[in-house]
Amino acid sequence: MKTFRFALVMLMVLALSSMAFAYESDRMDFGPIDFKGATVTFVAHFDNLEAFYEGGARAGRLEEAKKLFNIGEIKMVTAGWGEVGEVALNRYLSGDSNYDIWRLPHNSYFMLATRGAFYPVSDILPEEYFETLSPITREKNERLIFDGKKLHFSVGVPDDYGHAPFAVINLDLFEREALPDPFELYESGEWNWENVEKIGRAVTRDTDGDGIVDQWGSAFIDAGMMVFSNGGAVTRLGDDGKIYYALDESASIEALRKLGEWENELGISYGDYQMREFVTGRTALGFMPFWQINPNDYDFTHAVLPLPKGPNVDDYVFGPGVADSLYLPKNSAYPLGMVALDNFLFPLEDYYEVMDDMIRDRAFDRTSFEVLNRAFDEVDGDAAYYHNFLGAWWEGDTPFGGVIGGIKGGGVAATVVNEFKPQGQAMIDEYLKQ
C-alpha cells in the first residue's frame, strides 16, 4: 500500500512538473516547453531586448522567461545594419546558431533565404497561428514565402510597420505660402500627383535673393514610393504564384517618368534620404517611412497624409514597407520552443500598445491619427520592397538600382526599365527556383 501511495505521489509530482512548463500564448497552445538549460542568443542590428533590462518598460520579463522555460542564459549579439546578415549566416555555417533568434533587416532576407539558412516555420506552426497576426504582418508572410514555405513568424519588432511610407506635411509652410489645405485635399480625394506638382511649382524658388534655389516642393523621394502610389510594383505576385519583374508595367513606368520630371526638369524635389531639407523647413512635404517621422526634429507644425495618388489608382495606396522581421536558423535545435519564447517576450498586446504609442507620438491632429491607423489596417501587399534582391536604389549595378540611376540621370523611363528587365527576371527566377 505504501509503495502504491509513493508511486501515486510521484506521478502527481511529475504531472505537476510537466504542467509547469506548459505554455499557451496569445497565438497558440505550445504545450510543455523546456530548453533544458540551453543558452538562447538574439542576433540583431540593435539591442532589441533593451526594454527588458532594469529600468526598461518590460524589465524582469527575461528572468521570467528563463524560469518558465528552463533557459540558462539569454544573450544579445549585435552588428551593424549592413553586416548583421553576414554575422547570422556565419553563425549558421559554423553551427553556432542552434538556439538563435535572428532579427534581420530587409537587406539580409534573400542572402540568407537563398542559402537555405532559415527554418521553415510553417512546418511546425498551423495556419491558424498566422491568422492571429496583424494585417501588416499577414501581408508580409504572404510575400515572404520562399520555396513554398513561411519563414517569418513574429510581430515583435517596430519595423513590422516602421517602414510603411507616408507623406509628411509642413503645415507652417503651407500656410505661409497660401497653399491649398492639405487636409481638404485628402478628404476630397484630391491629394494626388497633380496637386503636389502644383504645390511644388508654387514654392520652389530662391527665397533669399542669392541666386540659389533654397526651397522646394518635396525633399528626396524614394522611387519605390512613387511606383507604389500609382499602383505599380517593383515585383508582382502573379495569379500563378510566381513572382514577376513589374517595373515595366505602365503604372510603374509612369511613376518613374514623373519622378524624373520632378527632379530633373522641374527641380521641385531635392535632397537625399536623410531628409535634411524637410527637417530644416525648406520643403513643403517629405515622402518618408513611419520610423523617420520625428516631430521632435521639426520647428514647424506637421501633419501625416498618405502618399499622393497617381493617375492610375482610385484610392490611396498603403504599402507595408520592407522585410525587417524575425527568423530562426535552419539548424534550430528547438524551433517550437524558440517561437514560444518569442511569443512570451513579444505578446500581441505589447505589439499594439507600442504601435499605438508610436502613432500618438507622430499624429498631432485627428486626420493624421486616422491616416496612420488606416495604413496599418488597409495594407496593399503588392506595394512592398520585399524582393530587394533586385537591389536598393543606391546600388547601381543591380536591376532596381540601375533603373533608378538611369532615371535620375535623365534616361527615358520605358527604355531604362526594359533594359534591366532580362537581368531582373533572371535573378527572380534563379533565387525563387521558379
Image (tube, helix red, strand yellow):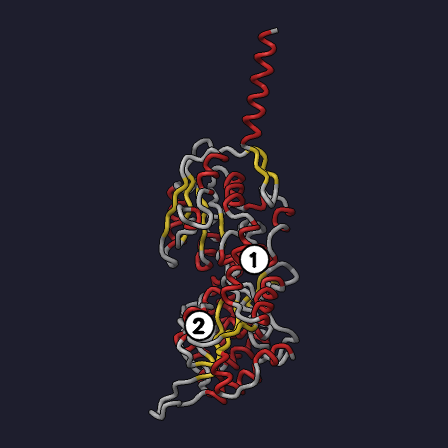
Label 2 neighbour load within 10 Å: few <14, some 14-19, many 20+: many
> Does the image show residue 419?
no
- The residue at 58%/42% (across/down) is 25
Across and down, in percent, residue 399 comes to 46, 69
**Secondary structure under badge 1?**
helix
Quarter the N terminus occupies: top right
Identify which amino acid the numbered label 1 is placed on.
Lys
**Taking 404 as reference, is 2 left or right?**
right
Across and down, in percent, residue 177 comes to 49, 88
The residue under label 1 is 140
Whether pointer 2 and pointer 1 mark residues with C-beta atoms closer than 8 Å, the reply is no
Label 1 neighbour load within 10 Å: few <14, some 14-19, many 20+: many
The residue under label 2 is 402
Which label lies toward us, 2 or 1?
1
Q: In terms of image quadrants, where is residue 393?
A: bottom left
Identify which amino acid the numbered label 2 is placed on.
Gly
Across and down, in percent, residue 206 comes to 39, 90
Vertical order, 241 against 6 (above or below): below
Query: Alpha carbon of mark 2 to alpha carbon of mark 1: how far?
Result: 26 Å
- The residue at 53%/70% (across/down) is 364
